[in-house]
Image (cartoon, coloured by chain):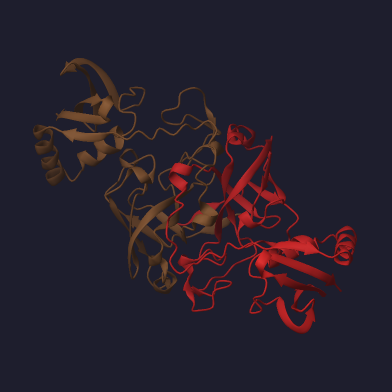
Chain colours: A brown, B red
Amino acid sequence: MDMNISPIGHLSCNKKERYEAPRQGIHAKGTTGIIKLNPHQNFEQAVSDLEGFDRIWLIYGFHLNNWWKPLVSPPRFRERKIGLFATRSPFRPNQIGMSCVKLLKVDKLKIYISEFDLLDQTPIYDIKPYIPYCDSFPDASTGWLVPNNVLYDLVMTDIFKTKSDWLSENCKFNVENYARVQLQVDPENDERRRIIKTDKTFEDKTVYTLNFRTWKIDYITDKENNKVHIIDIY
Amino acid sequence: MDMNISPIGHLSCNKKERYEAPRQGIHAKGTTGIIKLNPHQNFEQAVSDLEGFDRIWLIYGFHLNNWWKPLVSPPRFRERKIGLFATRSPFRPNQIGMSCVKLLKVDKLKIYISEFDLLDQTPIYDIKPYIPYCDSFPDASTGWLVPNNVLYDLVMTDIFKTKSDWLSENCKFNVENYARVQLQVDPENDERRRIIKTDKTFEDKTVYTLNFRTWKIDYITDKENNKVHIIDIY
């Protein structure tokens, strides 16, 4: 039995392109998005009492995708291909995603959230409260997946900061957010499309380059302290 | 943007009617179900590596439902009506459910599960691995919802056991499972449609009656030991 589903609203946020979204929502602390629910459907009432929950589930569409393959190569796992249903890949037979996000505030038809991995204009199909006793299994084993939870902090030079602020004001794209999303996990993995290991060094460390549109971002990593030092963008 | 979704398979299990499903899957330990994936869609490959996961998410359709209301009366909560999106009610604008279930075994196109709250013939739209670091938030607060986690054990008299075994063999319905689902939580709440507080007593305790089709099940509760003693079915 096929089913037709209609959005109850859409997400509005400053992440527009696939490569701006973090792998998982919990890596996106500090970014706020707004779910704008459709008017004239009594959703004002349907969101009553939602505000007591720390977290909510969003069921949404991977609206930029329309194909799938049975085996996929997850990011940062190169040993072999993995069965699609054993991954959270956004390319699926039914392009449905689910994410547990942090609920900040409900204001009539606007729901403010953070810690999400969704892109701007994502269609939202359902909202459910997060209930630990049926959703939380902290010790569940995860098979092939060895989560890499080491998160790197970004440290920026003044010159990078000046340029990225200028870009943010004049070109409306947030280079800092992009660099954080791309580099906070596994920043030296040059099998990723946008990362290049260069022959250059800086303070005795190998310089890597992260590509952003036609721009290049040079950085070095300090593994001991889990820091990425961003040198310049040009 | 509306989206059309097609089942990737269907659940097969011995729970046929809404009132046979437990409130939450974790209340249904011991029951096994089989997700039968569709043939000829390469799903044999798509389930590779799933077996390493203790738990999986099912995204499915509430296939018996086709309406919704913005405010609902959750079971065992009578203070006021609650906004639909702050509940897991199965009556929703898009009739999509998600449940974290226990994965037992994968055998080609058959996926064996337990601890589920789904009914027989439920259409399954997606399977995703359960990943604690993005799905598990054991301390998330839950607003209006005060989960009643006291689970009662069922103790059955020989006469009840004999009769229920006979019914199970000859009428193909599982009275024991039904009684467990209905009585393991809050067994004395006679605001529930199927529970009646009688004027009778048994061993100095008030007898309650649980209705099952045209049958009646008499029981008493032992709150101190979280036990429900089932006396008879007639």
Q: Whole-percent x and y of residue B205? A: 74, 78
Q: Is residue B28 above or below residue A164?
A: below
Q: Whole-percent x and y of residue A214? A: 21, 31
Q: Is residue A50 above or below residue B25?
A: below
Q: Whole-percent x and y of residue B23? A: 62, 63
User: If the image is split into quadrants, where does the N terminus of chain A sit?
Assistant: bottom right
**Residue plotted at (71% across, 71% down):** B221
Residue B164 placement, left or right of B184 = right
Instruction: Point out the residue furthest to the top here.
Output: A199
- Residue A170 seen in the current view: yes
- Residue B19 seen in the current view: no
Q: Nearer the viewer, residue B111 or B1?
A: B111
**Residue plotted at (43% across, 47% down):** A62
**Residue plotted at (30% across, 28% down):** A187
Q: Is residue B22 above or below residue A90?
A: below
Residue A79 placement, left or right of A14 = right
Q: Nearer the viewer, residue B18 or B3?
A: B18
Q: Quadrant of residue A110?
A: bottom left
